[in-house]
Amino acid sequence: MPKPEVSASYQELSEDVERVSENPTEEREGEMEVNEDSSSAILPDGELGTTTPSLRFSKTCLKNVFSVILLFIYLLLMAVAVFLVYQTISDFREKLKHPVMSVTYKEVSLYDAPGIAFYPGKARLLSCKHHYYDHIPPLINPGQPGDIECTTQRINYTDPFTNQTMKYALVVQGPRDVKKRELVFLQFHLNETDQDFSAIDYLLFSSFQEFVSSPEKAKFMKDCESSYSSWKFSGGFRTWVKMSLVKTKEEDGSETVEFKQETSVVNYIDQRTQPRSDQLFFVVFEWKDPFIQTVQDIITANPWNMIALLCGIFLALFKAADFAKLSVKWMIKIRRRHLKRTRQVTNHIN
């Protein structure tokens, strides 16, 4: 009697083993469900959904905001660097177009004696002397011929502007010794004139020695008259001329010389016994100071400084671009990590 029951139980056990071997995944899924149920039983749903994901999300959000702020800052710095590059190049081009005038002063003890060319017309030179330390003794016989102690030369040449009119010039050697305050005092006399006022023209040129050694003095004087300005001094006055020399260096390397002068006029009181209708001219030439002024145009833009500045700016641009690239990659990485964690949490909850 008991044998049939044993055979029946054995048959049921074998059927169960076959069923398990045919569906092993179902059994594992069942075990996982049991584990999930147990874990859900250990940790409530409120703690799993609110604490850990929210904290992670807040930290990620702060990192993203901070990254965006840094990215905008470096973009702003890049914009400033680009503006500085543009401004630097513009300033360099502007300085090339507009050079700055440089003025230097060179002190000398002796000047090269200048030439003083007078155009007296009908007037006659009465006296010419060199004095020192600004001491001019009183005239003994004003209006009468006196000593001519200056080196003079007379020359005739055609007017450089008309090429028809003949001009007569009296060229006198000017003062040299600036330390002793050397001056040249000249007296002219004009007997009669058909004008309402009387004056004598004169011009200054840089070197009397060049005029003396020139083979063509007429051409030399024509060139001087074309290049230098002329002035006047009037009759009945004592005119005091203080000269200063200005040298200008051109862009091609040539050098031009011109004179600046300060003129003071003092009335001459004619103390001759008998009234005269003639005119007397008195003029004094003296150096103003021992400094020769040199004027030169210089370009303040230094190409090496500009190149160094541009290199620094471009280096900053590359660094900023590199940092921005790394920041973007970091943001993308954090975003992907955040999405991955969110997906895992969602799958876990489901």
Image (cartoon, rainbow, N blue to C red):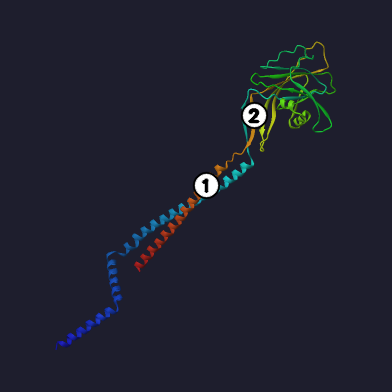
Write down the quadrant of residue 162 in the picture: top right
Badge number at residue 6: none
Left-right relation of 67 to 154: left
The residue shown at (38%, 65%) is: 343
Q: Quadrant of residue 129?
A: top right
Badge 1, how many Cα within 10 Å: few under 14, some, many 20+?
few
Using the image as rendered, state which of residue 153 and residue 260 is in the foreground.
Answer: 153
Q: Residues within 10 Å of mark 2 (few under 14, many from 20)?
A: some
The amino acid sitting under disc 2 is: Gln
Q: Amino acid at mark 1?
A: Cys
Percent position of residue 24, x then y: 29, 76
Where residue 180 sits in the image (x, y, percent)? 65, 18
Residue depicted at x 79% and y 29%: 218
Q: Where in the figure is residue 59, as x and y percent of width and height?
A: 38, 56
- Which residue is identified by label 1? 311
Quadrant of image for the N terminus: bottom left
- On residue 293, the disc is 2
Left or right relative to 316: residue 235: right
